Image: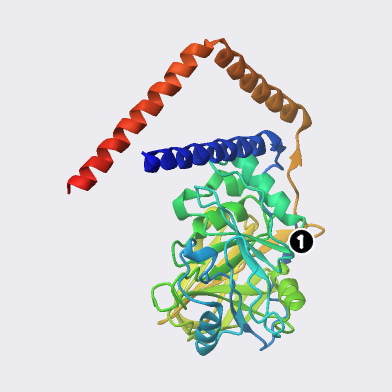
Amino acid sequence: MNVIKFIKKIVMVAGFFLILFIILGLIEYLKCPIYQFPDPIPFQGNRWYNPYSELDSTWFKGNFQVQSHSWGGLTNGWDDARSIYQHYKNLGYDIIAISDYQKINRFDKLGINYIPVYEHGFNIGKRHQVLIGANEVNWNEFIFWQNIHQKQHILKKLRTRNPFVVIAHPRLLDAYNHRDLFYLTDYDAIEVLNHFRISEKLWDAALSAGKPVWIIGNDDSHDITNPAETGVCWTMIQSKSTRTDDVVDALKKGKMYGVTGNGGFNDIHLSQLQIKNSELMIACDQPARKIRFIGQGGVTRYVVENVSQAKLTLAIDDTYIRIEVESERCKLFLNPVFRYEAEPLTRAAAMVEPVQTNLFRFGFAFLFGTSILIARRVPLMRRHKIWQFQRIEFITWFKKLITNYESN
């Protein structure tokens, strides 16, 4: 019987904390404002922004998402930070950032290649973000569900303390959809390449809405011994150095491209990308099996095969063009060139809509208060009997469980 009493106490304590957890979670939803989003308008203007207009030979290979053994193994990372660092170093990576969940991994923090990164998100829908150059861990979260306003609120919170915000693996569990990418603001890039999912269509949705957001390629590996998730997605960055400030500056300007392949090996590299007289020209250091030009709505504009150079005459209705280069062993995903009028990298931000926000909060409080009043109208004796019945049912079940265990 002492065991039964002990179990009963544990269940009651666990139930108390579960209720507290749910209440605190609901309060977060109540605090979330309603946002007014900028209209999705395709890129326009007579000028073209080209992130590769001034290329040189200084490129660094980077991975910004890999999970180490953390939080007692709860987050499913198998390897320690030192093993991860050495493994990626052996694969020829220059930038090796460990993105533990809700924790900035400080391994090699005094090294020249160290960049503070973490993965934000502990909700049931895998709506995560990668924070590059992170200053501190943010614990704001909507745990149970997220609509577009809650997703936007998280991005705004993260933007205030992090220089480069990346939407992580958007296709995983359909965490982000096309409508989200049409409207969401306050982020810099999308993790288009990830060993779980490739999300180029969602990237095209954001670009088609006139949002200058860049590509990131990350393994998101949880086990470095698994070749299917390690060294398969990476980012090539043209930066002055591997120091955090230089890397973040290059990323914000779009001076990188994503790659898929095996073992972190590039058998082809971007050499040049220029726009002259309404003609977009790309050159690679090796002949490509296929070069594809993609524009508004993710529509393929032009394809050429077995060449190291290709050109596309930009049409008057082209809003952006991005290029994919396919070789025998890897595939390059270049950032887009796009039209602009004044400031090419200016991003319109979603703003709080005060009237709708107050109406939402009033309605939420009204429903919550009404529920309490209804509950109070249930006679105390009846509620007591219901609770006693639940306790008796549990005790009876537990006694049967003990009896069966002892008999076996």
Residue 332 higher or lower than 194, as above or below = below
The residue closer to the viewer here, 390 or 149, is 390
Q: Is residue 157 above or below residue 166?
A: above
- Return the x and y of residue 266 as percentages of the image width and height: 50, 84
Q: Tell me what residue is drawn at x 52 percent, y 59 percent.
A: 169
Q: Return the residue found at the far left.
A: 408
Local crowd size for mark 1, using a 10 Å CA cut-off: few (<14), some (14–19), many (≥20): some
Q: Position of residue 241 (x, y in %)?
A: 72, 84
Q: Quadrant of residue 387?
A: top left
The x and y percentages for residue 92 are 54, 88
Q: Nearer the viewer, residue 105 or 227?
A: 105
Q: Does residue 344 appear to the left or right of 78 in the view shown?
A: right
Relative side of 155 to 101, left or right? right
Q: Say which residue label 1 marks.
A: 344
SS category of the residue bearing label 1:
loop
Q: Nearer the viewer, residue 373 or 30?
A: 373
Q: Position of residue 302 (x, y in %)?
A: 50, 66
Could you say which is closer to the camera, residue 354 or residue 299? Answer: 354
When the figure is inspected, residue 377 is found, relative to residue 60, above or below; the finding is: above
Q: Is residue 34 visible?
A: no
Q: Quadrant of residue 71?
A: bottom right
Q: Residue furthest front?
A: 2
Q: Residue, x 63% and y 54% (percent of image)? A: 317
The image quarter containing residue 54 is: bottom right
Amino acid beneath label 1:
Pro
On the picture, is 16 further left or further right than 76? right
Q: Is residue 160 visible?
A: yes
